[in-house]
Image: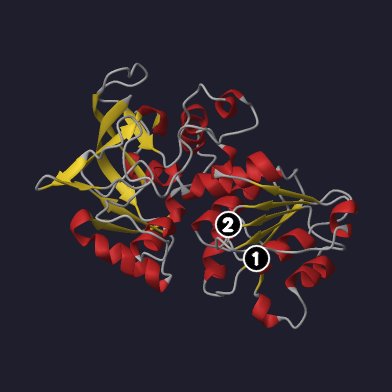
């Protein structure tokens, strides 16, 4: 159930940076990072029937076995077999790696390891896409952009003319803003501590900006005043618990929905008064925008092909594989959104 992919383009996502800095506990080493990518099937292993050499694909850090209770549920995309596992550095089939150097194993990363000209991936983590789609653009759909986009379109579901607050204006947050733009939201309020992101965010439909540092009162109170009681929807894309509280408390009572996307610190907790829920606010969480990788990603690619979804504006830099460290430097400085790495 494995396929070998020739990776043509990969982009750098903050998750790669996080594991490269080894801030995560018990880092596996040596390891090939990378997970946001596009490529072509080079060969297929035993049991693979859905893919053939030459197919254009997006490898994905989570999967869809199509057999488990989650895959059979219309509501979930959290496959029991293939959901993301940051600790596992080996293939599921035999518990071994497909990379080695001088007979010693090099470990995999979230089942993808795309910072390599060739990689081996479980078939359930590979989305077959339209062969006409430009791989140097749609590679960004295999992680961050889809995560934000789906959080808005599939989970928050704002109606036409509604108001949406987006917390965090990195690539995921701007993906969420793009979703709000596509849904026809009339006000999209961007919240970020970095004012340099505000100009860029206008391209994604963001109409107003808030920097919590500019206000003495909590940002949720500022938003409530701006919107006559709160926004209709909010999407939290930072992983900061204070932003999570603000995102929940800034939605309107009676109908407001807040969606959490950002991944918090492992010991994080947050508290809010139960009356905030009893007053008919809804708090939801999402993983990868509720997209099932194999079933749903091809249609997201079609949204781009049909010129509904704009991807070019997410791609701010491009480097050859030789200069991959430049992509890391840009992200460390907080410059740009996505840097495409040409393999």
Dot 1 falls on a residue whose secondary structure is: helix
> Quick check: 123 above or below 262?
above
Looking at this view, name the residue that lies furthest to the left.
102
Residue visible at 40% across and 33% down in the picture: 125
The image quadrant of residue 57 is top left
> Quick check: 105 above or below 25?
above
Would residue 250 be visible to someone looking at this image? Answer: no
- Which of the labelled discs sits on residue 270, or is there none? none
Identify the coloring.
secondary structure
The location of residue 234, given as percent across then percent down, is 71, 55
The location of residue 89, given as percent across then percent down, is 33, 46
Q: Is residue 61 left or right of residue 20?
A: right
Q: Which residue is mark 2?
A: 262
Dot 2 falls on a residue whose secondary structure is: loop
Whole-Å distance between the Cαs marked 2 and 1? 9 Å
Q: Which residue is mark 1?
A: 241
- Viewer-proximal residue among 49 and 317: 49
Residue visible at 63% across and 49% down in the picture: 181
């Amino acid at each position: 159930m494995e396929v070998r992919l020739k990776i043509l383009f990969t982009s750098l996502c903050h998750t790669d940076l996080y594991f490269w800095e080894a801030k995560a506990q018990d880092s596996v080493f040596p390891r090939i990072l990378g997970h946001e990518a596009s490529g072509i099937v080079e060969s297929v292993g035993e049991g693979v029937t859905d893919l053939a050499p030459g197919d254009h694909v997006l490898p994905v850090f989570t999967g869809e076995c199509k057999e488990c209770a989650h895959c059979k549920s219309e509501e979930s995309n959290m496959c029991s077999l293939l959901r993301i596992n940051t600790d596992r550095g080996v293939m599921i089939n035999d518990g071994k790696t497909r990379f080695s150097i001088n007979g010693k194993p090099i470990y995999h990363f979230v089942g993808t390891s795309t910072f390599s000209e060739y990689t081996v991936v479980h078939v359930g983590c590979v989305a077959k896409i339209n062969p006409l789609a430009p791989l140097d653009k749609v590679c960004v759909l295999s992680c961050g952009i889809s995560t934000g986009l789906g959080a808005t379109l599939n989970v928050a579901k704002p109606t036409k003319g509604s108001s949406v607050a987006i917390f965090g204006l990195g690539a995921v947050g701007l993906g969420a803003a793009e979703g709000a733009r596509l849904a026809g939201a009339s006000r999209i309020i961007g919240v970020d501590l970095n004012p340099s992101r505000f100009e860029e965010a206008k391209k994604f439909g963001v109409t107003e900006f808030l920097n919590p540092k500019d206000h003495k009162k909590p940002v949720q109170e500022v938003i409530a005043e701006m919107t006559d009681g709160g926004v209709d929807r909010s999407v939290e894309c930072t992983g900061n618990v204070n932003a999570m509280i603000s995102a929940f408390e800034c939605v309107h009572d009676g109908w407001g929905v807040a969606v959490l996307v950002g991944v918090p610190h492992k010991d994080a907790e947050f508290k809010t008064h139960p009356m905030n829920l009893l007053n008919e606010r809804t708090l939801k969480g999402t993983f990868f925008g509720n997209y099932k990788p194999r079933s749903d990603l091809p249609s997201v690619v079609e949204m781009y092909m049909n010129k509904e979804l704009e991807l070019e504006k997410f791609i701010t830099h491009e480097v050859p594989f030789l200069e991959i460290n430049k992509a890391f430097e840009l992200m460390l400085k907080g410059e740009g959104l996505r840097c495409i790495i040409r393999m």
